[in-house]
Amino acid sequence: MNNLAAPIAGVRDLVKIFPVKSDSGGAPLQLHAVNQVGFDISAGETLGLVGESGSGKSTIGRLLVGLIPPTRGHVELFGEAITGKDGARHLSNVRRRLQFVFQDPYGSLNPRMRVDDCIAEPLDIAGSVSRKERADRIIELLEIVGLPRSCGDRYPHEFSGGQRQRIGIARALALRPEFIVCDEPVSALDVSMQAQIVNLLLDLQEKFGLSYLFIAHDLAVVRSIARRVAVMYAGSIVEQGPRGDIYRAPKHPYTQALLDAVPRPDPERQRKPTLGGEIPSILNPLPGCAFAMRCPLATDRCRNERPMPREVGSAHLVACHLA
Amino acid sequence: MSDDLLKIDNLTVQFRGDAGWITAVDDVSLTLREGETLGIVGESGSGKSVTALSILRLHTAATTRHPTGRILYAGKDMLALTARQLRAVRGREIAMIFQDPMSSLNPVLTISDQISETLRLHQGLDAAASRQRAVELLELVRIPDAKRRVDEYPHRLSGGMRQRVMIAIAIACRPRLLIADEPTTALDVTIQAQILDLLRELQSSLGMSVILISHDMGVIAEFARRVVVMYAGRVVETAPVKDLFRQPVHPYTEGLLAAIPKLDVDVTRLPTIRGSIPDPAQAIQGCRYGPRCPVVLKQCLVEAPALLPAGPARFARCPPRVTPRVAPRVGAP
């Protein structure tokens, strides 16, 4: 873990707008999936990106590794800008250092490929490995993710969800990446499997100094893996900061409501009154704060003027006029 | 006991597989009293949904069999009812809501049509009366602007609103028993809180008994009064909710509670349960949890423990032990 200070990934004023056909056949609508987002991820660090459906968290993951181009804004990886004039060339320079782990290990593994071939496919595509090196690396990768060697000549469907996610992780590690975007990697798994995979990701981070962007809707899972957390709502990051600040002393009314709404495994707990309303449409959004419609504290200013992130503590940013 | 609304005795459910019958539910017994809220919790393959679907006989008859067991609902032997008798119970006395409201709603019928179907079938209402009642039901489940929404199609509604429509259909005939199978699993957490509040409110205003099936220990803790924990087709533990969370008796319950990511404290590593959930097609001798259990005894791997009393109003499928229980192993895959 050298170079602790330099960010592995940096994002500034990121905007992604998807054009959507209008129901009435008029001009296309603009779906503001990501609306002026900024954050950094340092070497060896995990940033947890948490939000409900449609908050834009998965879109950010895809923008960050160059799977889709942003509408506006800057993305920098390993010090190279992958957006802008030389973006494509810079992206191909750094591509081998990035990987992606998906939610659905069923969907991301080719069912007709043996597990050893699934794991070695990135090596095959990158080229220039001998048969001996390839075989050794497969054995090494299986061991790293806690699968027996004998798994190599079986097929993905023979494995449980948790084991398939281990295979997906082995494959992601094949080219020794430094930065992995994990998009809901444990959401499809049962609780007893979730804990195993979360611990595996933590072990791998320690061993190889990996950096993660860990995207999830489950606040408790995020707390168990990320040291820094960003909370998204309707395309914006409403609050980001160290894990302790976000969970112990959340400043944004949405973060507070979200934490209150999660049922705890404690029958004695009385949940606070429920947040009303639903997540607003991100088609042609209104001016002002996206949360204003549901916020118990909203003022006229909130409805008219969009709050920008402000520092309220050390590395703790909140986008709220009232915080 | 006469005040049991529902009593399941030694129910076994098998499905036809490629190589013979696969046991999805094995010797499950449970009871539900009038007005009670029972939670059934378990991971994939635990048999919680299969058990619930058997109550209303919603499995495909040709590929399902019940080699043992009895399901008594209000004195009726559900497994022996004729198709006609069954229709009189489904939707009228026992209603059910599911995880995914979109696949339970018909996309080409309006909300009004779908609520009216139940009302016309069971209560013989005419078109105008059933439409009027549909609007009232939508108001009851807090759908804003119900008069307009009643004529819309399901795809126009959000996931939370669709689940409210499903609940409106379920309560249309004022059922005595509502079975809710993962009703909030597909919803965002703030919407989940709204739906749980709504269910609780309706339960007390309509005096329904509720069976809530969930994989989420948080939802169970918040909603249920008594809990049945299932694992790999069997009941492993049943207890009043506070006792279960304060002091789980079965090592599986204990391991599962420990493995839940914590929202209110920082942990460096989560305790894990070793191994994976067993494949239902694979026969396991003895206790199903034996191969994963951190405190397994030799006898557990030979003969499955019986469901034995384990305290006031509690049962567990785990032999009483002399040695103190150790915590689940940490970090082992």
Image: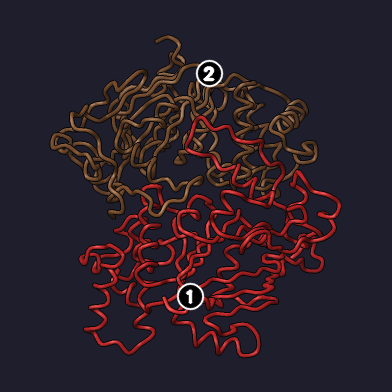
Distance (Cα) linking label 1 and label 2: 59 Å
Q: Name which residue type carries label 2.
A: Gly
Tell me the chain of label 1.
A
Label 1 sits on residue: A4
Crowding at mark 1 (Cα within 10 Å: few <14, some 14-19, many 20+): few
In x, y percent, where is residue A307? Answer: 77, 60
Element on which disc 2 rests? loop
Label 2 sits on residue: B35
Q: Quadrant of the C terminus of chain B?
A: bottom left
Describe residue A323's horizontal placement relative to residue B92 as left or right: right
Element on which disc 1 rests? loop
Above or below: residue B121 compared with residue A209: above
Residue at 16%, 37% (x, y): give it: B297
In x, y percent, where is residue A161? Answer: 37, 55
| Nearest the eye: B24 or B17 | B24
| Nearest the eye: B27 or B257 | B257
In x, y percent, where is residue A150? Answer: 20, 65
